[in-house]
Image (cartoon, rainbow, N blue to C red):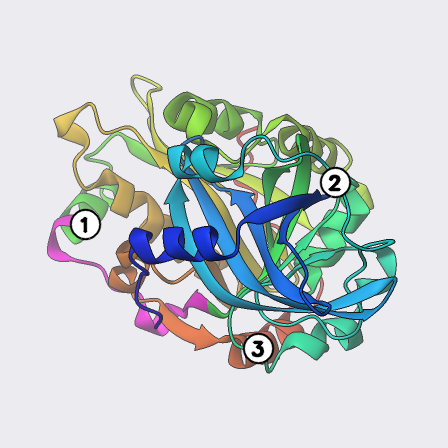
Amino acid sequence: MQEPYHIDYIQSLIIEYPPRYKTSFRYVSEPVGGRGKYYILINRSPYKYLLLFGNYWQRNEKSIGGQIEISELVSSSFIQDSFTGIEQSYPFESWILDGVVLPGTLVELSTSHLNSEWRDIFIEHTGPVYFHTLKWDAKVYEAQASLGMIAISSELSGKIHMLPELQESYAVLDWVNLHVDSKSHKIIKRIDEGLSPYILKVYSDPLKVLYHLQNVWKEKSWLRRPYRRLMMELALNRHLYKLKLWGVTLENSMTHEVIAGELGYTLGRTYTSLTGFFYRHNSAWNNLGKVQLILLAQLLKEKGISFWNLGHPYMSYKTKLGAQILSRQDFLRRWDDKVQADTIDIDSSFD
């Protein structure tokens, strides 16, 4: 795993290769002999950006090649100090990244890319592969998800893009590996015996969960307005799509308080988590975030889901739950097999 770069080192690169041009979402250093450095900024939250730094080389007057060397999270203040005031301009006649795109490069997504043959170009690459599109279309979203990508939204050049990612590795939970700690086991036992008011609910309408996600994460949420609208489109016209969106909550059946939950989807015999929430203000709810995950895992197993795609593996709660970390190659091999089946309905009829 790549060690974090010291911010002084990244700053020294910017001083040595200062961004002179702004080309769509790239910042580009002055080309010398048809070669130079470029930067890509991906907004991850109001306070953090993912900074990608790499080399480019000119193929001809209309295309370049590129390769990322560094990817690192940096603060918004760092970005403001280094990248403000640069006007949109182009060092070449046009700026098209041509040929096979190398790890970490941001690739514009088109309908011609939405197939496994094109995706498989990237399987052997190390590092993440990001795609972007301004086309907030449910069919495009479903197609990228079917290929094993997980999409968020991000602001690039003042516009909200869909940003699917073909991850370098994935956290995958197989039911045989599900870990239930002793505290959670006691709570779930009481729920099963009818001695506890907590209940897991699964909704085909995600509106309730979208509200709570926004309420918990506020401006830190990547569920920007176009993404939320797209989620409602998938829900309202779910008969048109193989991808089925779900809102999951853990609630108190007596007080109707919502405690924890998540947004996710089923495709074939798979389930994928997008994002979740947990209200931490009530100490009586300690451990209930974990209980929600365990109850959902048990429900998915009961419904016939083959495995749970938990996405990025770097959050420790996923491995504590029992998830194994799979390489891109191993994950896609399993994913492609199970996603071909008819999509499983996990609705608990609480609409």
For the point 25% across and 64% down, which residue is it? 179
123 vs 300, left or right, is right
Give the residue type that dot 1 points to: Ser
Quarter where residue 96 is shown: bottom right
- Under circle 2, the secondary element is helix
Quarter where residue 134 is shown: top right
In the foreground, 331 or 185: 331
Which segment is the magenta one?
A: 170-184
Point out the tag, 2 or 1, that comes first from the N-terminus: 1
Give the residue type that dot 2 points to: Arg
Point out the tag, 2 or 3, that comes first from the N-terminus: 2
For the point 74% across and 46% down, which residue is it? 133
Label 1: few (<14), some (14–19) or many (≥20) C-alpha neighbours in 10 Å: some
For the point 46% across and 60% down, which residue is it? 71
Q: Is residue 120 above or below residue 23?
A: below
Q: Position of residue 168 (x, y in %)?
A: 50, 70
Q: Quadrant of the N terminus?
A: bottom left
In three-dimensional space, the C-alpha distance between marks 2 and 3, rounded to whole angstroms, equals 25 Å
Q: Where does label 3 land, which residue?
A: 334
Q: Where does label 1 land, which residue?
A: 184
Q: Where does label 2 land, which residue?
A: 238
Q: Quadrant of the C terminus?
A: top right
Can residue 241 be seen here? no
- Under circle 1, the secondary element is helix
